[in-house]
Amino acid sequence: MNSAEWTEAFRAATVDVAQMDVGTVSYEESARRLRTLLKTKLLLHTDLRDSPERFFLAHRILATYATKLGPGFWIRFTVHYNLCVGTVLALGTEEQIASLSDMQEHGLLGCFGLTERLAGVSSGLVVNAVADWDEETDGFTINTLDVGAAKNWISQGLVADKAVVVAELRVKGVSHGPHAFFMDFRRDGEVVPGIMLGDMGKKTVGNDLDNAWIMFNNVKVPKSTLLNRYADIRNGKYVAADSSRPVFHMIGQRLFTGRVAVAQAALEFRRTLYATTKEYTDKRQCWTPTGSRPLSSVPQVRALFEENAKNQHLCDRFVAKCESELCRCLRENTLPSVALTDAIAVAKVKAVEDSIKFVHLLQNEVGSFALMKGTGFEQRDFLTCCKFAEGDTRVLMQKMARDRVKAFQKTRAKAKAECTEETALCSELVEAMRQSSSGPEAAWDIQHEKVYRLAGVIIDRTVTSFLSPQSKL
Ligand SMILES: Cc1cc2nc3c(=O)[nH]c(=O)nc-3n(C[C@H](O)[C@H](O)[C@H](O)COP(=O)(O)OP(=O)(O)OC[C@H]3O[C@@H](n4cnc5c(N)ncnc54)[C@H](O)[C@@H]3O)c2cc1C
């Protein structure tokens, strides 16, 4: 099937998804529709590795339904295909990867348990769930020892059959850091013994998606659940297979695909909302002393549509370039360069934050239309979900600024000579940290406005340089 035929087939297979009434549909029914979609095999579990453009296209198509559906089904889909299945592809052995086709055949759904209650957006940097190696049973015992370690917000947790759970691996009491375990979550619809879970509660949008908190109480899982391409237990000892690819680094690979998908989803949401709103503003006649004119021609509205189109085009080009570079890495099974991972973080922040800004501006220029149910504005919290999914905006901006200041400190003399806004901000932050009597971390916090301004400058510079024909990754 060529790309156009595939697009048509995928749209046809998701007609019932696009038509869901998210106000009344149950999460079980929404999950059933994903099971049916899996079984069509239009998007194979291995496409993220073998045909990554198709993986991204599927996400974009689903995002075009988001002004009607909100974030529920899109998150359900990406958690299954990217976070759960994608982590098995990134970290699993051939045998573990082979089991994914059986999963697809039977329409089994997967969830991804990373986020913990205490760690919130810093989950991953901090993992308190533990998986202890148990010599006697030749397996692991998974526990969340306190409520802070409980997994929360786990999408599809109330229906999933399989789970990738991230827990700190301990062998004979020695920690080897976070590892991923691909385990049965339900068997014949029943949650496996030792797992406790509950509903996170009603949300402003996306209630067709179930979100669960999950606790593990001495859950015994076999050795084969450890995704062990890069690390294993042999003769009771922890063995890292490839020191250049630490396990947690490889779990993080799914964040890059997720960030591109989220950036594109935010852009699709905004594109659809602007298009449907424009249909309205073209028709809506506004009174003037000399007759009427369409709302679209009122100067501030016209200017907004123009500015939005320019910005959207820039974001589209930038994110598309990130996608194509990342697809090359996925197909060649190489890790993205530092320059590409930085660009992907920029893409995620820029696409999401600019979409939030432009949707907010639109909402405030089109009168009562933006208040009406069914216009898409009621689903704008879709963009709020984009903000913290796969790397929170603020956390990513903090990292951009920290990395830049560190690099500045290494090449200070040369950087000072360049004297741009970026180097000036770096210099001011370094000085503030040096002079602070309460220590560099406190100074960094006090200077938070400058920190985020620096990140903003980095974002603008990265977009420009990455899109230039001379860009090297
Ligand atoms: C609908 C939905 C589906 C989800 N699905 C999954 C899933 O399937 N699997 C999974 O593992 N997780 C999932 N998550 C979790 C998600 O990825 C976030 O980790 C989680 O929502 C964090 O929420 P929180 O309220 O605890 O954030 P908090 O940690 O309380 O952070 C709140 C805000 O504080 C700021 N902040 C916090 N720390 C810092 C810092 N160090 N520096 C600067 N600013 C900071 C940020 O602006 C952040 O947005 C889901 C969340 C939602 C809402």
Image (cartoon, grey):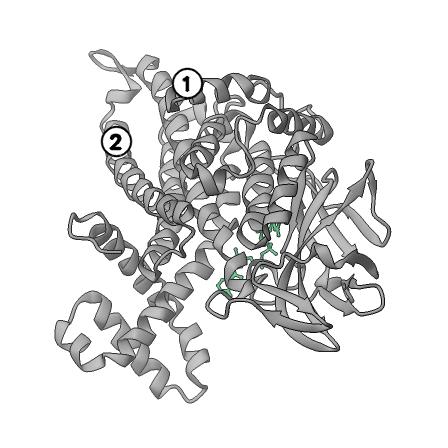
Q: Image check: 52 left or right of 239?
A: left
SS for tag 2?
Answer: helix
- Of residues 23 and 247, which is closer to you in this image? 247
- Quarter of the rendered image showing ligand 1: bottom right
> Could you say where residue 275 lies in the image, as x and y percent from the top left?
36, 23
Q: Is residue 221 left or right of residue 365?
A: right
* Residue occupying the point 35% across, 38% down: 358
Neighbor class of circle 2 (other Cα within 10 Å; few <14, some 14-19, many 20+) is few
Marks 1 and 2, how far apart in space? 41 Å
Q: Report the amino acid beneath label 1.
A: Glu
> Which image quadrant for residue 36?
top right
Q: Which mark is residue 154?
A: none
Amino acid tagged 2: Gln
Mark 1: which secondary structure?
Answer: helix
The answer to whether 197 is drawn above or below residue 176 in the figure is above
Q: Quadrant of residue 229?
A: bottom right
Marks 1 & 2, CB-CB < 8 Å contact: no
Q: Is residue 139 left or right of residue 168?
A: right
On screen, residue 374 versus residue 309, left or right, reads right
Earlier residue among tags 1 and 2:
1
The residue labelled by disc 2 is 300
Pinpoint residue 111: horizontal percent, then vertical percent: 66, 44
Residue at screen point 63% across, 29% down = 34
Q: Residue at x 27, y 39 (%)?
A: 317
Q: Which residue is mark 1?
A: 5
Q: Nearer the viewer, residue 133 or 298?
A: 133
Badge nearest the viewer, 1 or 2: 1
Residue 2, image quadrant: top left
Q: Residue furthest left?
A: 417
Question: 121 or 9, which is in the foreground?
Answer: 9
Instruction: State the image coordinates of residue 238 (x, y, percent, origin top left).
Output: 65, 72
